[in-house]
Each structure stands twice: as structure tokens, then as C-alpha cells.
Amino acid sequence: MIEIRAKLVRADSAIYATGERVECLIEFTHIGSPGGDNIRMENLAWASAQLHCYRKTSYNVATSDKVNELAELVGKTALDAVTQASGDIIIATNPKILFCDLKLSPGETKIYFFNEILPRNGPPTYRGHDIKYFYKITIATQRVKSKVQMLAVPIRVLPIPIIARLDEMHCTEETNDELAPTNPFLEKREISELEISWHHLKNVTARRAPKYYRISNKRGFVGRFCLFKSSYKIGEDIVGSLDFSNCNVRCVQFSVKLQSQEISLQSNANQTSGDLNDASSVNSLDLASVASGTAIDNLHKSKTSASARNAEAEEPVGKVSTFTTIHQVCYAMLKTSVIIPIPLHVTPSFRTDLVELRWRLHFEFVTSTMMDFGKPNPIEGELKAPAEIPVETMVWNLPVTAIYAANPLQIYSPSQTHSLLIK
């Protein structure tokens, strides 16, 4: 018997970003069979490895030319990766041959190294209500006159926005080497496009641009909410403040929920190509505009202006999922802070030809027109709260501009060793 063991080189985190290189060690060991002939050599005809991205959805999707091409190509070869996972293959890298005609003596082990770059235009790993995207490294091998056997190694992929105007973004290494005398015999290391994306993504999420929102209902002014920045990375905290001073309506308590919106884009298929991106790519964000604040300011105005209220009511809500909830009782408070953590396991904002993932803050305010418990504070003694307070509930949804991916090395997700036994 031959045992195949596969383990990712990055043992502390089985998470990668689009455009990053995936490295895997594949081990073939002749372990022998109990009660059998353990002195006979084992032989494998060939073995290959490649990366697949699968899509599983409940939508009525017309098969694209790319999927048809992959299906036709798979049908002409011995490697049928479609049968290993339910769903359509939307991305398949070129297979890399590990060996041909491998012979192993009892107890002998051969180790092979596989590496592949994740496509920049691929979707992230996502498990939603109506659609799922997931990635697997497929390792296939075959004995002579036997069927093909495959081992799948799952990985998690995070989306990195593609820079629209790369030539306008200059990124230099901030090191002390620039202060030292130049050596003409040393080659300067070129900075990759992925490093430039990480650099500007850090600038976008670190930029503080406070936005103030006036909260009121038909009874009057309730308070003012301040959001210190609009873009975040997974693992960060969304920090804001609520100011209830000079209010006409008292806020008794409130709750804030971090929610994702899975919006189907099938109904928008007839829109112009300017509204939707390429069918096989993730939405490309112009980080130059975002870094300069132009896109954020325009979005803030469009979402909060009075002229956009009617349009906002017509926007699709999609399937909503709640990830974080906080609750505060604030009847006697003039100011309070709001801290909503973003879990590391969530999927950042992205968009494909079928679905768009957005994020929002869902507020629920419990208000009352009874100010100061309905009576002034006593000069002496204790203030007793009334037995009943007339209250009303109001709901407010505040869109979050974007939630981006964090550095995969900052997310602890140890990879397991995956094995397959060939008898």
C-alpha cells in the first residue's frame, strides 16, 4: 500500500490572498500491507497537482463559455475533478506533473514540492445562502490498469482589490538601506503588484475620515452618531460614538448588529456593462480614488442626502446574516461609545457576476418622550424610576463602505495533514 500525505508549507495559516503563491509538500510512502507481501515494490504510473475553484449555487445559471471549455477539457482527460466536489469548476490552473513511473521500496518515501499562484481575478472563499465558492488543491495519481484516485486539500482565499491605475501608484521600501552608500553590484529588489496592493490597502483602511449622522424620528431629535472611518479590515473594531445631548427624544436603549447582505445580481443582468464588472472577476476598486477620499465622500453623500432616500428604499436587501451584536442601556447617558468587532472568519466585501456581498450596521433604538423619568430630580432623597415608560422602536441601517481582507499571516488557522491510502 502507498500512503499519500499532503501538507501546506505555511502550517500556521491555511489562508491565502488572491495573487499569492500556494506551496504544498506531497509525500508518497510505501507502508506495506498487513499480512501481505511487504517485500514487493509498489509502482505508480503518474501523479499531478493543480488548483481548482468550485462554485455551487441554487441560481439558474446559464453555463458560461469558460465553464463549458473547462468541462469539455476535463471530459477529454483522465482527471475528472468535477466528480470530487459538487459544483461547477470556474477556475482551473494548469496541472503540474509530479512524476511518471514512480517505484517505491518497502518503507521508502518520496517528497515532492508543489506551488501555484492564485489568480488575481478569482472570487474569495465564501459560504452564503444561495451560493458558495471554495478552493481545493487536487492531487491525482494512478496505478497501471487502475482508476485515478484523488486527494483534495482545501484552502481559504481572501480577495485583494485589483489596482486600477498601477502606474500612478508609487511604492518604495522604507528601509535604512537607502541612506547607505549605493552599491552598483547589488540588484534592487522589485516590488510585486501584490505588495503594492497590500501597501495601499493599509493606507485605505488606516485613513480616518469622521462622518456625522443626525438621528431623528417623527417625535424629534434623538442623537448624533459619529463613525470615525468608513473602511475596515477583518479583525478590526468598528468604533463610533453616540451623542444624546440637546435631544428632544430620550433614547432608552439601543442595539447595533454587524450584518452582511448577500445580494443576487441575476435580476440586474440586463444592465449596462458599466454597472457590472467582468463575469469572471472580482470587483476592481480604484484604490487611488479611495485613498484620496473622492469615492468615500461621494458614497457618503449619495447614501445620506435627501435626494437619495427614495433610491435607497428601492435598493435590494438580499439575504441578511448577523455576525456581531452589542446592546446598551443609555437612558441617563449624554454620550457613549460603540465598538463592534469584525470576526476573522467572515468574508470581505466582493462582487462577481452572480452575487455581491455588502456590509452594514443595523441600529435599533428604543426611544421615549418621557424626559428625566417624567419629573425633575429631587433636591433630597433618591430618584425613583416610574413603573412604566411609553417607548417606541426605530430602525436605521448604515452601510459600511467596505470591509477588506487582512494579512493571512495575522490569522491563526493551522493547516491539517490530508492523507489518502492507495491499496
Image (cartoon, rainbow, N blue to C red):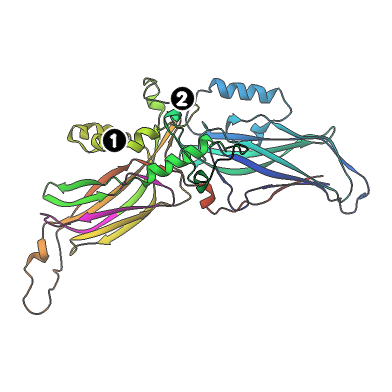
Q: Return the x and y of residue 116 as percentages of the image width and height.
A: 64, 36
Q: CA distance from mark 2 to mark 1?
A: 22 Å
Residue ID for mark 1: 299
Q: Badge 1: how crowded within 10 Å, few (<14), some, or many (20+)?
A: few
- At x 54%, y 36%, the residue is 192
Q: Is 89 displayed left or right of 323 in the figure?
A: right
Q: Which corner quadrant of the image does residue 384 belong to?
A: bottom left
Can you tell which mark lies on residue 394? none
Q: Earlier in the sequence, mark 2 or mark 1?
A: 2
The residue type indicated by label 2 comes to Asp
Residue 391 image-quadrant placement: bottom left
Give SS at disc 2.
Answer: loop
Residue at the spot 27% in from the left edge and 32% down from the top edge: 314
Q: Are marks 2 and 1 in contact (CB under 8 Å)?
A: no
Residue 271: within the magenta?
no
Over which residues does the magenta segment extend? 229-255
Residue 313 seen in the figure: no
Dot 2, how many residues are within 10 Å of its Cα: few (below 14), some (14-19), or many (20+)?
some
Residue 220 in sight: yes
Which residue is drawn at the image coordinates 10% and 79% (left, top)?
A: 381
Q: Is residue 215 above or below residue 146?
A: below
Q: Which amino acid lies under the numbered mark 1 shown in the image of this protein?
A: Leu
For the residues carrying marks 2 and 1, which lies nearer the camera in this image? 1
Q: Nearer the viewer, residue 56 or 292?
A: 292
Number of marks in the rendered image: 2
User: Measured from the top left, where is residue 75 in percent x and y?
Assistant: 68, 24
Quadrant (top left, top right, bottom left, bottom right) of the C terminus:
top right
Q: Which residue is mark 2?
A: 278
Q: Residue furthest front?
A: 181
At 13% from the left and 50% from the top, the residue drawn is: 221
Residue 371, image x, y percentages? 10, 61
Residue extending farthest bottom? 381
